[in-house]
Image (tube, rainbow, N blue to C red):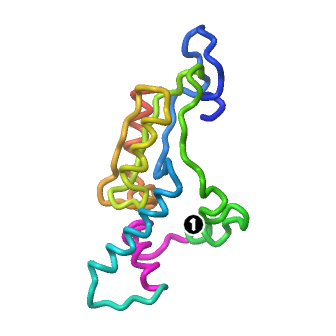
């Protein structure tokens, strides 16, 4: 995507090699997503005033509510988190990231679908920021009902149907 956006427009039409794109649970601003995380944790705590959660219990409650709503973390996801790198783990390495629009003379970016789960910690405001960052009028926003951040693992059929429907229309 970045290479498509950074190409200068050659006035020979929209001959981008990328026909369309899908972003799933992708934030536009790391600082905002960290603030949203804090807000969601406080909300979980406030909604359970009779509980005195340990840090591990709160992490699990957050996971089951906003990260992956399955009763148990899928092995493939647990393995991915366990084997995450050391330099790029967490948000510290990208703390200042904010999605920005490409230069005015850039080629038009392809049609894009922006997806997020209903309970995703990547909130509507964060995914809404893609409207300003993409230089295309063809953005489609979809919310996967009943899902959180890892919607593909939670409801693969719904996720796949949205992807198939989108590509059938745009590719």
Element class at badge 1: helix
Q: Could you say which quadrant of the image residue 13 lies in?
A: top right
Main secondary structure found in the magenta portion = helix
Q: Residues within 10 Å of mark 1 (few under 14, many from 20)?
A: few
Q: Is residue 95 left or right of residue 68?
A: right
* Number of residue marks: 1
Q: Report if residue 67 lies within the magenta region.
A: yes
Q: Position of residue 60 (x, y in %)?
A: 44, 79
Q: Is residue 80 magenta?
A: no
Disc 1 designates what residue? 76
User: What residue do we see at 44% from left, 32% from top?
Assistant: 167
What's the magenta region?
56-76
The residue drawn where x is 45% and y is 55% is 152
Image spot of residue 96 (x, y percent): 60, 53
Tell which of 164 and 26 is nearer to you. Answer: 26
Q: Is residue 55 above or below residue 74?
A: below
Instruction: Tell me the quarter of the image containing the N terminus.
Output: top right
Q: Is residue 118 above or below residue 9?
A: below
Residue at 33 percent across and 49 percent down: it is 143
Above or below residue 65? Residue 97 is above
Seen at 53% across and 55% down, the residue is 30
Estimate the x, y position of residue 138 in percent, counting from the top left: 41, 27
| Residue 15 drawn above or below residue 96 | above
């Amino acid at each position: 995507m970045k290479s498509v956006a950074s190409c200068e427009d050659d006035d020979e039409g929209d001959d981008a090699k990328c026909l369309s794109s899908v972003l799933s649970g992708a934030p536009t601003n790391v600082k905002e997503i960290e603030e949203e995380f804090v807000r969601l944790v406080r909300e979980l705590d406030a909604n359970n005033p009779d509980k005195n959660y340990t840090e591990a219990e709160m992490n699990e409650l957050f996971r089951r509510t906003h990260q992956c709503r399955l009763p148990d973390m899928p092995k493939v996801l647990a393995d991915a988190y366990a084997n995450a790198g050391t330099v790029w783990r967490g948000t510290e390495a990208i703390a200042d990231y904010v999605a920005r629009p490409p230069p005015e003379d850039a080629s038009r970016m392809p049609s894009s679908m922006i997806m997020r789960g209903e309970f995703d910690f990547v909130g509507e405001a964060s995914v809404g920021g893609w409207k300003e960052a993409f230089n295309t009028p063809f953005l489609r926003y979809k919310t996967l009902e009943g899902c959180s951040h890892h919607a593909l693992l939670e409801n693969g059929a719904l996720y796949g149907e949205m992807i198939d429907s989108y590509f059938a229309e745009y590719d």
